[in-house]
Amino acid sequence: MKRMARRLFVCFIVAILSGCATNRFMMKDANLAEKPGEANLLIEPYQSLGLRETEEVRAGRTTVIQGKFPEILFGEYYPGRIRWNVWGVDKEGREYSGQALFSGIAFTGDFLWTVVLDGKVPDSVSMMVLATGLDFAYDLLGEETKLEPKFVRDREYRRKVILEKGTKVGDMKKIPGFGQVAAEWNRYRTTEGVLLSPLGDQDVKLIAAINPQYSFSEKLVGSGHFSVSIDYIGTAVGVGIDVFRASNGSIPSRGWDYNSQLPSRRNMAFIVKYVAALKQRLIDNLNEANRSLVTQKRR
């Protein structure tokens, strides 16, 4: 009897915590597609392993641009992470949603975003990438802005801060052909819909098993059909998985938003090693390109 009571009590606490976690990220007055509604900005760790397949993504109705990844956001990185949320507004108050995908490093030494916006978004729309806990936001040049807690419940505040601090779609480079890249990614069915990811089945299960949940939804269930693809996002995330495997999977499980505590310096060392590995890969590629040029000139 005591054991049953204890279980019921645990279930009650879990339900409360799950509801609190979800409500903190729920935008009640979203003005997407000129229609007021709700938008859930919660990203559980397993959901950040790829691109959420929205109706627009599925239909190919997207606007895809490039941005600069802010290095401070490596504080929210963990093995395999790809995705952060994006929010945009125009002067009339219409709102736009999207997803920012970490895309590795450029020849300039800058880390990059691939920003996938739902719909054919006008160039005049301003947008920002949101930190996991919605406590900070970033323009597409990497500049940070601290957000007030009312971000999810005050449409006028969102409009004001994003118009003032965000980046216009038309100011950034468009990325053609992203739909073909994402079409080659693996498809995973989750409680929140389909997740598209360059990670393979075993890698996804490996990371999903160590990641904590911000709510208590189910783990990933693979669709049973997996493809192999090579692309710039897949390459970047692959380096993270390689470094993680080399550490024997010894990264303790905790949250990875800014409000979470690093359980050990081992986690911090992993992030440093990952960033160094990406930079070293860039150096190696540049050196290889220089050697090829020298060889061609000698011929």
Image: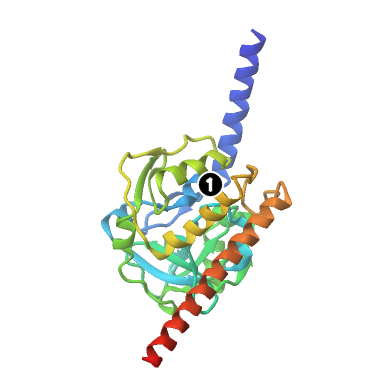
Seen in the picture, residue 151 relative to 123 is either above or below; the reply is above
Across and down, in percent, residue 6 comes to 65, 17
**Image location (x, y in percent) of residue 137:** 58, 63
- Look at mark 1 in the image and give the residue it sits on: 45
- In this rendering, the answer to whether 164 lies above or below 179 is below
Nearer to us in this view, 216 or 245: 245
Does residue 167 appear to the left or right of 1 in the view shown? left
Residue 187: x and y in percent read 34, 47
Farthest residue toward the top? 1
Instruction: Please say whether residue 287 is visible from this viewpoint.
Output: yes
Mark 1 element type = helix
Report the quarter where the N terminus lies. top right
Question: Hey, which residue is sitting farthest front in the picture?
Answer: 299
Rendered residue at 36%/72% (across/down): 175
Task: Inspect this view and state whether residue 135 appears.
Answer: no
Please give the name of the residue rendered at 29% of the width and 53% of the height, measured from the top-left corner. 58
Mark 1: amino acid:
Pro
> On the image, which quarter does residue 143 sit in?
bottom right
Looking at the figure, which quarter contains the C terminus?
bottom left
Say above or below: 23 vs 49.
above
